[in-house]
Image (cartoon, grey):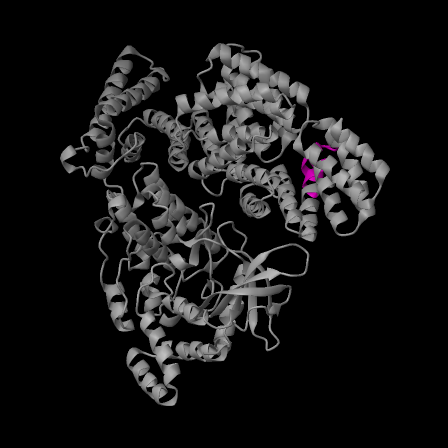
């Protein structure tokens, strides 16, 4: 059988799939009389279409490949633009996908080419293909396969050139790797990241299924095939997709019934995907059903819980996960999660042992989780905490007479006792379901009761708001903390108490800072200071602390001038209160030292950081979270100055103490892991370096979320290592993703973006894209000119990278000027830094390529000497 015959089979099969089963039989009978061989092959394909192929959910494609493999493929060896086709990957409803190699000698690269089938060259199919190209052109995410190029054949048939992804379909990967439940959930969260990114870019995928999600060798998913995706800006008539163009097993009820499709349609598909990942089977068995039967089953019945079908390996799925899956799959879109991010957050709550939103806020559920896990020990500690809060509230308010004091204390004791009894009486063990809970949930219950107005005395209620908000913040529960501080601010406004309001604003500002809302945090701190200025009283130390908080938010936005000024004002105040303000003094010394370090003022920075650590060791000792932060900062400075053995010793001590005192989920643990990774990279211990940097990225992603500036910062450090290890594609993916996060998390002229842009430029150079690298380097240089002092080392590094991009684009004179200007600045400011050695390597490569033996020998001597 010839290739032309198989092309006819493919086209005939596509025509048959548009018919209902009865019409298909009539069509086959007619075809049998005209071409029996053709009819026989099409009948085999239609039979395969009714069977379940869990690996790719595309038995038709597998059958076509199997049949076509026995004959020569006419596409093999064809040249499309810069690429030569070397093999066929798959054949499907929208055409064929081929593996190809680049042939223009720019660099070696394998790609996937998606070619639209000629049988689909109608206006509708062409529109879908062009929509896919439009969508992919704007997608830059580590978990989405990238579009590299595109074009058209001589007959105007379009094709796409995409990143070639190797890996297994999602569910197959879970099975072959025998992943645990938690590992499957972590992998699913990465898929959610990719889909949420698409939604933020106004794209609904509409065909999420295991075959469109490959898991690569590093365990990362790659979302493929936006062939029936929908741009949210499209007109409503583009919302519907025929059954033949979607995958019914994963399609939402509104897709099956032809209703408008939105982002919650993808939420539904993700729910089906998670059901299959956790149970090993799909929620509905649709094989062999007609469209009307599919619609009735999916739209009118509720699937059984995934835990009822879990394999022996995955036994013990909690009711929480059942609830999450079924909420995502609710047949009414309004009752699903409102977004992919909301679904991902509930999965994260489960992983952290917190109550999931899918089960609501039933008090019996929350209290039973708490009591089952921690029983009396944690209950007793929580009672002690709340009684301590109440006692603190009482002692912080003067009472004018003994009689008023007695009445106040009696009312307080009665209120607190009732408060605690009301919380714990709802933890009836007979009503529990055996699920787990963390200690923080007792705070959830207390906060809810407080919100319901348990305390008539507003000052007690306000102070409890502050205390519970502070505990929430220390636990990393920032939304709940913000609610408590906001309630305190409202009470203070009612009472006309500016000091209480200022304290509430300070707490809220700290929460906003931790959430990455930097400008709002700054505004909150500025308002707090203005209130304190209106009622100064005896609050000098408190004013200094607020100045330091304001400086912290300014520093995080790259405003070093105002941050340093406010920190120096705070130091001037605190030095007059050496005992009362010792903790604030240490923190202010630390913050100013870190700022000066970034600006290259290393001597004063080291002096301040050592003072901060000495003060902390004297006042609170080594086993304290603030002391650990100061140890960490000093180690970072010592590393930057090339004192690696001392830096390593401090870092390892900090890591041990963090794990011992604060647990594995300590919110800032990623900073220590990141800096250890960077240190080991500089010490040429690359396996250790990668271990710590990957651990840091995983930690910050889990604790702070995917869109936090610190998440991007840790990703850039890992990208730098991978770039150094000559793994440019991985480095590029991370750097591009980090820049996308920074674009939302920090101002456009923040130095973090400059540093990340240089990493991004380096990966583009390695991938043979110097013109794009030039753009990134110029962006970094522009930011440095706006945000950093003249002559800063980061600007010099940007000049060096820019010089290399110009040299690669045959502009040697401009390149030489930049390369020669940059190196002396870096050598003077950071002689031991990798940026300096990289700048020297660029000069050596430049003069080697130019054949300038004298200059080459000079710079080689600097390298070797």
Which of the image's four quarters has the C terminus? top right
408 or 434: nearer the viewer = 434
The segment highlighted magenta reads 782-796
Which of the image's four quarters has the N terminus? bottom left
Q: Quadrant of residue 243?
A: bottom left
Relative to 281, 681 lies left or right: right
600 or 736: nearer the viewer = 736
Q: Quadrant of residue 378?
A: top left
In this picture, is 616 found above or below 846?
A: above
What type of secondary structure mainly makes up the magenta span? helix
Residue drawn at (25%, 70%), measured in percent from left and top? 293
In the rendered image, the residue lying farthest to the bottom is: 33
Residue 846, position as x, y percentages in the image: 78, 42
Relative to 244, 363 lies left or right: left
Residue 644, position as x, y percentages in the image: 60, 22
Residue 609 visible in rendering: yes
Residue drawn at (30%, 26%), measured in percent from left and top? 457
Residue drawn at (72%, 47%), measured in percent from left and top? 805
342 or 392: nearer the viewer = 342
Residue 427, position as x, y percentages in the image: 19, 32
Relative to 542, 663 lies left or right: left
Residue 40, position as x, y percentages in the image: 35, 80
Relative to 149, 654 lies left or right: left
Disc count in the image? 0
Quick check: is 792 in the magenta stretch?
Answer: yes
Residue drawn at (59%, 75%), measured in percent from left and top? 156
Q: Quadrant of residue 815?
A: top right
In this picture, is 136 found above or below 789?
A: below
Quick check: is 776 in the magenta stretch?
Answer: no
Residue 526 visible in rendering: no
């Amino acid at each position: 059988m010839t290739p032309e015959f198989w092309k006819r089979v493919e086209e005939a099969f596509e025509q048959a799939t548009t018919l209902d089963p009865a019409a298909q039989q009539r069509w086959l009978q007619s075809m049998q009389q005209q071409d029996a061989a053709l009819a026989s092959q099409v009948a085999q394909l239609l039979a395969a279409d009714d069977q379940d192929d869990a690996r790719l959910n595309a038995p038709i494609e597998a059958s076509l490949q199997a049949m076509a493999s026995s004959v020569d493929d006419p596409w093999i060896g064809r040249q499309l633009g810069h690429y030569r086709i070397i093999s066929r990957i798959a054949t499907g409803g929208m055409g064929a996908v081929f593996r190809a190699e680049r042939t223009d000698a720019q660099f070696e690269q394998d790609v996937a080419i998606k070619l639209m089938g000629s049988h689909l060259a109608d206006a509708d199919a062409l529109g879908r293909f062009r929509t896919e190209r439009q969508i992919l052109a704007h997608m830059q995410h580590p978990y989405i396969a990238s579009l590299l190029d595109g074009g058209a054949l001589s007959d105007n048939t379009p094709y796409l050139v995409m990143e070639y992804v190797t890996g297994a379909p999602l569910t197959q990967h879970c099975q072959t790797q025998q992943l645990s439940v938690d590992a499957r959930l972590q992998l699913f969260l990465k898929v959610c990241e990719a889909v949420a990114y698409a939604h933020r870019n106004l794209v609904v995928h509409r065909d999420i299924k295991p075959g469109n999600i490959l898991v690569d060798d590093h365990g990362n998913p790659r979302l493929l095939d936006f062939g029936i995706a929908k741009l949210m800006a499209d007109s409503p008539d583009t919302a519907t997709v025929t059954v033949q163009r979607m995958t019914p097993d994963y399609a939402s009820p509104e897709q099956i019934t032809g209703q408008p499709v939105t982002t919650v349609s993808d939420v539904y598909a993700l729910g089906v995907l998670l059901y299959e990942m956790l149970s090993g089977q799909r929620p509905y068995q649709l094989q062999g059903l007609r469209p009307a039967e599919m619609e009735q089953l999916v739209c009118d019945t509720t699937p059984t819980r995934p835990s009822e079908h879990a394999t022996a390996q995955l036994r013990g799925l909690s009711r929480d996960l059942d609830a999450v899956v079924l909420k995502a799959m609710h047949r009414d879109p309004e009752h699903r999660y409102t977004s992919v991010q909301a679904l991902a957050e509930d999965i994260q709550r489960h992983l952290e042992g917190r109550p999931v939103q899918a089960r609501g806020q039933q008090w019996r559920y929350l209290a039973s989780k708490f009591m089952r896990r921690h029983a009396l020990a944690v209950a007793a500690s929580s009672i002690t905490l709340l009684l301590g809060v109440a006692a603190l509230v009482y002692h912080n308010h003067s009472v004018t007479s003994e009689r008023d004091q007695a009445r106040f204390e009696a009312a307080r004791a009665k209120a607190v006792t009732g408060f605690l009894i009301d919380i714990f009486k709802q933890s009836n063990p007979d009503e529990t379901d055996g699920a787990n809970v963390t200690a923080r949930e007792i705070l959830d219950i207390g906060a809810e009761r407080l919100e319901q107005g348990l305390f008539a005395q507003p000052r007690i209620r306000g102070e409890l708001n502050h205390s519970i908000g502070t505990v929430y913040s220390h636990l990393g529960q920032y939304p709940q903390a913000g609610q408590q501080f906001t309630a305190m601010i409202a009470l203070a406004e009612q009472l006309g108490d500016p000091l209480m309001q200022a304290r509430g604003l300070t707490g809220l500002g700290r929460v906003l800072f931790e959430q990455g809302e930097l400008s709002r945090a700054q505004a909150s701190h500025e308002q707090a200071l203005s209130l304190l200025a209106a009622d100064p009283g005896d609050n000098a130390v408190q004013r200094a602390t607020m100045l330091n908080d304001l400086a912290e938010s300014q520093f995080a936005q790259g405003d070093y001038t105002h941050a340093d000024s406010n920190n120096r004002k705070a130091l001037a105040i605190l030095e007059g209160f050496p005992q009362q303000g010792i903790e604030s003094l240490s923190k202010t010394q630390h913050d100013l030292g870190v700022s000066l370090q970034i600006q290259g003022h290393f001597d004063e920075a080291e002096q301040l950081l050592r003072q901060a650590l000495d003060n902390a060791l004297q006042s609170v000792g080594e086993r304290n979270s603030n002391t650990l932060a100061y140890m960490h900062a000093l180690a970072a400075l010592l590393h930057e100055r090339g004192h690696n053995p001392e830096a390593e010793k401090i870092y390892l001590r900090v890591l041990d103490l963090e794990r011992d005192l604060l647990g594995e989920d300590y919110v800032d643990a990623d900073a220590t892991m990141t800096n250890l990774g960077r240190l080991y990279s500089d010490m040429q211990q690359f396996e250790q370096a990668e271990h710590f940097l990957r651990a840091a990225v995983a930690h910050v992603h889990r604790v702070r979320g995917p869109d936090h500036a610190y998440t991007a910062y840790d990703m850039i450090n890992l990208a730098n290592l991978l770039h150094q290890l000559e793994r440019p594609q991985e480095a590029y993916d991370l750097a591009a993703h980090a820049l996308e996060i920074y674009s939302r998390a920090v101002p456009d002229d923040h130095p973090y973006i400059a540093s990340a842009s240089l990493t991004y430029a380096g990966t583009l150079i390695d991938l043979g894209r110097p013109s794009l690298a030039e753009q990134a380097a110029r962006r970094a240089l522009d930011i440095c000119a706006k945000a950093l002092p003249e002559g800063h080392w980061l600007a010099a590094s940007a000049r060096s990278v820019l010089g290399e991009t110009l040299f690669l684009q045959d502009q040697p004179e401009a390149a030489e000027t930049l390369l020669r200007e940059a190196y002396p600045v870096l050598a003077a400011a950071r002689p031991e830094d990798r940026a300096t050695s990289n700048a020297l390597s660029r000069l050596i490569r430049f003069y080697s390529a130019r054949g300038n033996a004298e200059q080459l020998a000079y710079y080689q001597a600097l390298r070797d000497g």
